[in-house]
Image (cartoon, rainbow, N blue to C red):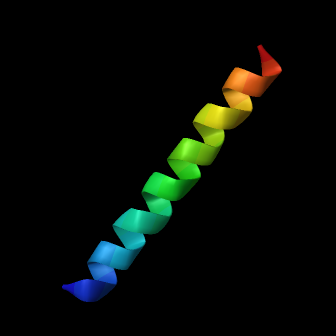
Amino acid sequence: GFKNLKNVGKGFASWVDNGLDLQVQQ
């Protein structure tokens, strides 16, 4: 339901943040 959708959004946001961090470090 909506709760699961919010959790997926949080996971995606954190995944994007991690990707940006990796790009900045290189």
Residue at 52 percent across and 56 percent down: it is: 13
**The C terminus is located in which quarter?**
top right
In front here: 3 or 16?
A: 16
- Asked if residue 9 is positioned above or below residue 24 in the image, the reply reads below
- Asked if residue 2 is positioned above or below residue 26 in the image, the reply reads below
Q: Give the quarter of the image for residue 18.
A: top right
Residue at 77 percent across and 25 percent down: it is: 24
Residue furthest toward the bottom? 2
- Asked if residue 20 is positioned above or below residue 10 in the image, the reply reads above
**The N terminus is located in which quarter?**
bottom left
- Rendering coords of residue 5 (x, y %): 29, 74
Residue at 54 percent across and 44 percent down: it is: 16
Residue furthest toward the left? 1
- Rendering coords of residue 21 (x, y %): 72, 34
Taking 26 as reference, is 12 left or right?
left
Q: Give the quarter of the image for residue 4.
A: bottom left
Residue at 65 percent across and 35 percent down: it is: 20
Taking 2 as reference, is 9 left or right?
right
Residue furthest toward the top? 26
Taking 15 as reference, is 6 left or right?
left
Q: How many marks?
A: 0
- Asked if residue 6 is positioned above or below residue 26 in the image, the reply reads below
